[in-house]
Amino acid sequence: MIVIAILLAVGAGLLIGTRVTTAHDAHVRFSRYRTETNESFGAWFKSVVTAVVSIAIFVLIAYALVIR
């Protein structure tokens, strides 16, 4: 009877251990994805701001040249 209880405890421990490992791996994967997404969004936003500022400066220079 004790052997069966020990085998059940070991089996339950292995089952719980694999679930914890799977959850940990999913969390790591999600955190990495979130970090990459934030970095790519930051790079995209920086390029959009640079493009908008460049276009605004171009329009101002063109406007100044046309008026004079």
Image (cartoon, rainbow, N blue to C red):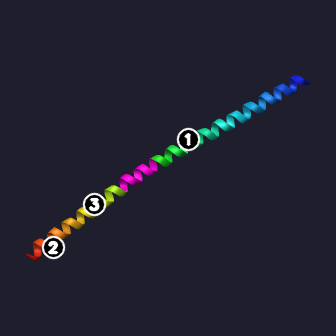
Q: Give residue 28's mark.
A: 1
Say whether residue 52 is left or right of residue 42.
Answer: left
Tell me, for residue 67, which label it has, or none: none
Q: Residues within 10 Å of mark 1 (few under 14, many from 20)?
A: few
Using residue 11 as the reference point, say whether residue 47 is left or right of it: left
Q: Decide: marks 3, 1 in contact (CB < 8 A)?
A: no
- Give, as a three-letter code, the residue at label 2: Tyr
Residue 39 placement (x, y as % from top left): 41, 49
Q: Secondary structure at mark 3?
A: helix
| Image position, residue 25 (x, y; %) | 59, 38
Amino acid under label 1? Val
**Considering only vertical position in the picture, is 49 above or below 1?**
below
Residue sticking out furthest to the top: 3
**Of the residues shown, which amino acid type is indicated by label 3?**
Ala
Mark 3, residue position: 51
Residues under labels 3 and 1: Cα distance? 35 Å
Q: Position of residue 23 (x, y in %)?
A: 64, 41
Residue drawn at x 78%, y 33% as measured from the top left: 12
The range drawn in magenta is 36-44
Name the secondary structure under disc 2. helix
| Residues marked 3 and 2 touching at CB (< 8 Å) | no
Residue highlighted by disc 2: 63
Q: Earlier in the sequence, mark 3 or mark 2?
A: 3
Look at the image and say whether residue 66 sits in the magenta stretch. no
68 sits to left or right of 36: left
| Rendered position, 3 above or below 16 | above
Observer-nearest of 31 and 7: 31
Q: Position of residue 60 (x, y in %)?
A: 18, 70
Residue visible at 82% across and 29% down?
8
Sequence-earlier tag: 3 or 1: 1
Q: Earlier in the sequence, mark 2 or mark 1?
A: 1
